[in-house]
Image (spheres, rainbow, N blue to C red):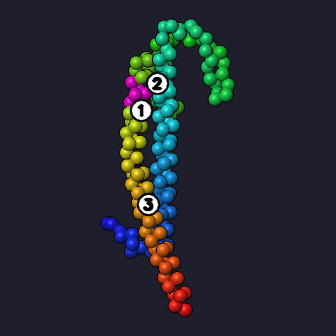
Amino acid sequence: MAINLADLSLPQLEGLKSQLDQEIDFLTSSISQLKVVQAKYVEAKDNLNSLNKNNQGKELLVPLTSSMYVPGTLNDVEHVLVDVGTGYYVEKNVADSKAFFKRKLDFLTKQIEKIQPALQEKHAMKQAVIEVMNVKIQQLQQSKQASSTKA
């Protein structure tokens, strides 16, 4: 069901604009969160490249928390523990891990691509509402000026 924006009152248009603002904020936030997760998967996939025979036995820093590291040695360059969600880790070889991260990245990319058009549509709708609001405000101002000059 299509609504003619010109038929709405100024308060109704303001309410619609407010609703669109909330939807735009939500969609923008969703895309941002997906991109943060996507960046983490890209980083994890890229870090798998450092697991090779040349780096076996090298010293490294192992994160215990986001701000605390302990020294360690890279012993196994063939297997890693992959966080598969909800606190579960699965041991995978490097090739399987890369494939896992690629699937996750593809999924996230598709989700972002689904949200992007909806966000653009909401922006276009908001712009249309603002234009109609501006026209109505100008009409109100003109009618006030016309009535004040008659008095």
Secondary structure that dominates the magenta span: helix
Distance between mark 3 and mark 1 Cα atoms: 33 Å
**Element type where label 3 sits in the image:** helix
**Relative image position of residue 36 (x, y in whole percent):** 51, 37
Does 65 sit above or below residue 24? above
**Element type where label 2 sits in the image:** helix
Q: Earlier in the sequence, mark 3 or mark 2?
A: 2
Q: Is residue 48 visible?
A: yes
101 in the magenta segment: yes
Give the residue displayed 49% in from the left and 36% down from the top.
37
116 in the magenta segment: no
Q: Which residues are magenta?
A: 99-105
Q: Quadrant of residue 111?
A: top left
**To which residue does mark 3 refer?**
127
Does 85 sit above or below residue 143? above
Q: Quadrant of the N terminus?
A: bottom left
Count residues near mark 3 (Cα–Cα under 10 Å), then give few for <14, some for 14-19, many for 20+: some
**In this orientation, which residue lies closer to the viewer: 68 or 22?**
22
Mark seen at residue 105: 1
Distance between mark 3 and mark 2 Cα atoms: 40 Å
Distance between mark 2 and mark 1 Cα atoms: 10 Å
Does 42 sit above or below residue 55? below
On the picture, is 120 further left or further right than 83? left
Mark seen at residue 45: 2
Give the residue displayed 40% in from the left and 51% down from the top.
120
Q: Is residue 89 visible?
A: no
Q: Earlier in the sequence, mark 2 or mark 1?
A: 2
Give the residue displayed 55% in from the left and 87% down from the top.
148
Mark seen at residue 77: none
